[in-house]
Amino acid sequence: MAAVVANSQADWFQIERQLERMVYLHWMILAVYVVVIVATMTAVLMDNRQPVKTMAWLMVLVFLPVVGIVLYFFFGQNIRKERMISQRSMDQLTKRSMLEFAEQQNLHIPENQLPLMRLFANQNFALPFKDNNVEIYTSGYEFFPALLADIARAVHHIHLSTYIIEDDPLGNLVADALIAKAREGVEVRLIYDDVGCWRVRDSFFERLRDNGLDVHSFMPVKFPAFTSKVNYRNHRKLCVVDGRVGFIGGMNIAMRYVKGTRRYAWRDTHLRIEGGGVYAIQRTFLVDWYFVDRTLLTKRLYYPDVSPTINNDCLMQVVTSSPVTPWPDIMQGYVRILLQAKYYVYMETPYFLPTEPILFAMRTAALGGVDVRLMIPLHSDAKLVEWASRSYVLETIEAGVKIYFYEAGFNHSKFLVSDDTVATCGSTNVDFRSFENNFEANAFFYGKEMALRLKTVFLDDQQHCQLIEEVTDISHRPFLTRLWESLVRLLSPLL
């Protein structure tokens, strides 16, 4: 009996020791978590962001234990102050385009656009180039044959940067064309975004490398080293062939731009440029190439003379933005265009989750009597984005902005035109991600001809739209629907 009691006491003693260790471990974990939370909140405060954003992240960290830390680690870190490329390297990459800029004859800057052009030149080193022939493509049926034809004509180099290149029939057709040129001795360089191509098998890119292409993914997400960079993606769509032809716009390389999807056809806008503006597209690619390959490409061969047959007043700047530049350059350009507009501003975007400066500028312009029109898809390819954008849509309507819902498919176009004097087209959506997180590129044009051509594209698209007043009960939806959309709106910076 005494032995049984002794054994029982020993068991209880062990259990008590285990419980003490568990309590001790619990308090250690809690202490570590509190330290991490406090350190993270301090980092958020020290970023000196807009107070609303700071408060939002502080609330996420306080009210979403563990999940808040994960969200901040993936999506909340501010890398705008980081330098991903040295100033010396940037100067070397820019030197050649500066020389070509200096060689331009009879360069006339329109007085009414000088402040906007100076803004881009001072902050982004976006130099204006004249003598440009521009073709506008509004479907994959137009764009991809032109791209493949120019690839086939390449004799020195092909530089291609895309957010997505799918392992589908169209992606493989482009891949085969690039491989054929590499076998001829043409330099072929490809940058694709790692997150944008997550669903593309590694074997697709290995086939390209095995056949002589120089291929790099942009900012690959490798756990845990680059996990915090998953939110910052290269969304640019650029191609330069022999330094003479450049492409810029909104189209990725995927079958949906030709065949559509089960739900809808895809509508997008892309530009083909010959002339001085190709120097600016080339510089943009070579800066990105230095980032992924650490190779400086500055030879004259990458900046050939503009054909003397191209002689016009089509003036353009290629403006880039990224989370590591001091200012959100493209967003500032949009704000300035909206605030300086006298007659109209027409905009197309697939996703409408505007930053506060953009929303303020749109409302200010509309209330000042400017004809502000915004075209967005009737149905988005991302439901969360569609829900989140509804409250912004209603907010702009109250200020007099005319909202057009495109219903002939999914309109993925990203362009703006104003007052028959200025227009822009590129990869930038009117949303938080494009303006603040992504690496983007837009071509800005100054002059009546390009403005009227893109205005015509907008008005043609408008024929396939419904004005918001014609959409049944959009402003009188059930309370729970409106509440849900307002809650999803809080996620706008992450969508």
Image (cartoon, rainbow, N blue to C red):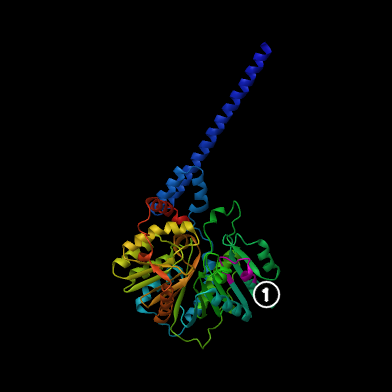
In magenta, the rendered stretch is 160-172
Helix, strand or loop at disc 1? helix
In the rendering, at what x and y percent does residue 328 appear?
Answer: 43, 63
Task: In the rendered view, tell whether residue 78 sits above or below residue 333.
Answer: above
Please tell me which residue is depicted at 48% across the width and 79% down the height of the picture: 101
Quadrant assignment, res 331: bottom left
Q: Residue furthest top?
A: 1
User: Does the magenta portion include 94?
Assistant: no
Please tell me which residue lies in front, 180 or 82: 180
Please tell me which residue lies in front, 382 or 288: 382
Name the residue tied to disc 1.
Answer: 182
**Which three-letter amino acid code belongs to the residue tagged 1?**
Ala
The image shows a total of numbered marks equal to 1
Please tell me which residue is depicted at 68% across the width and 76% down the height of the picture: 180
Please tell me which residue lies in front, 416 or 212: 416
Q: Is residue 92 visible?
A: no
Please tell me which residue lies in front, 40 or 249: 249
User: Does the magenta portion include 161?
Assistant: yes
Please tell me which residue is depicted at 35% across the width and 60% down the height of the picture: 395
**Quadrant for the N terminus in the image:** top right
In the rendering, at what x and y percent does residue 449 appear?
Answer: 41, 82
In the rendering, at what x and y percent does residue 398 appear?
Answer: 32, 61
Q: Is residue 431 visible?
A: yes
Task: In the rendered view, tell whether residue 306 sits above or below residue 62.
Answer: below
Q: Residue furthest left?
A: 368
Task: In the rendered view, tell whether residue 226 sits above or below residue 330.
Answer: above
Q: Residue furthest front?
A: 472
In the rendering, at what x and y percent does residue 35 appear?
Answer: 49, 40
Q: Residues within 10 Å of mark 1 (few under 14, many from 20)?
A: many
Quadrant assignment, res 158: bottom right
